[in-house]
Amino acid sequence: MKFNIPNWIIIIAGAGQIFTALIYPYIRHQVFDWYNDVKQLKPLNQEIAKTYGRYIQGLNFSFGIIAIVLSSQLKEPTLIAIALKGLIAAYWVGKVATQVAYYPMYEIPQKPIFKIGSYFMNALFVLFATVFTLLVIYNCINFFNL
């Protein structure tokens, strides 16, 4: 089965992942008032929460750079490309699943910019999950000659 996802779609997904990394501090501060909540934790737990926040931001940025710089290589049906795409796909599928399962229980501020932003960000997360999952599926089919 021959399938070709255009490089520009992968590059758009990469740019979107970089955008999520760059916008992440604004969302934490302006939308979720995250820093004031973290201040209520014990000092060690504050540092752990901040560290995990940086991990998320770093992964989003790194996945974006990988997608932009290596878009052609990510389409190749090699084991390393499949593994890397699988990692990125699992990350974003997990994010979407978490978003659907847990986040509706919480309210975000009702300002129009935040409501529109939440729809936009969710659309980006679904895009990332879809692009990388399709890459994994089709490259596994090509690699294993299924």
Image (cartoon, helix red, strand yellow):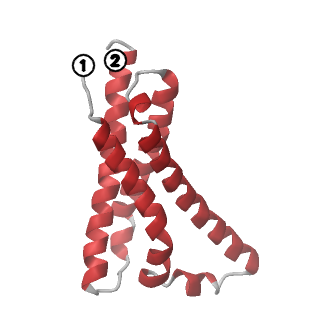
Residues tagged 1 and 2 counted as in contact (Cβ below 8 A): yes
Residue 55 to residue 9: above or below: below
Q: Residue at x 33, y 20 (%)?
A: 141
Circle 1: element type: loop
Position of 57 with respect to 92 (left or right) is right
Q: Residue furthest top?
A: 145
Task: Name which residue type carries label 1.
Answer: Lys
Task: Name which residue type carries label 2.
Answer: Asn
Position of 48 with respect to 3 (left or right) is right
Nearer the observer, 106 or 30: 30
Q: Residue furthest right?
A: 44
Horizontal and vertical percent position of residue 40: 64, 86
Circle 2: element type: helix
Binning the other alpha carbons within 10 Å of mark 1 as few (below 14), some (14 to 19) or many (20 upward) gives: few
Horizontal and vertical percent position of residue 60: 49, 55
Nearer the observer, 9 or 2: 9
Horizontal and vertical percent position of residue 133: 35, 38
Q: What's the distance in space between the residues labelled 1 and 2, CA to CA?
A: 7 Å
Q: Residue at x 30, y 53 (%)?
A: 126
Position of 37 with respect to 139 (left or right) is right
Q: Which mark sits nearer the N-terminus, 1 or 2?
A: 1
Residue 77 to residue 99: above or below: above
Binning the other alpha carbons within 10 Å of mark 2 as few (below 14), some (14 to 19) or many (20 upward) gives: some
Quadrant location of the N terminus in the rendered image: top left
Q: Which residue is label 1 attached to?
A: 2
Q: Residue at x 57, y 57 (%)?
A: 58
Q: Residue at x 49, y 85 (%)?
A: 33
Q: Which residue is label 2 attached to?
A: 142
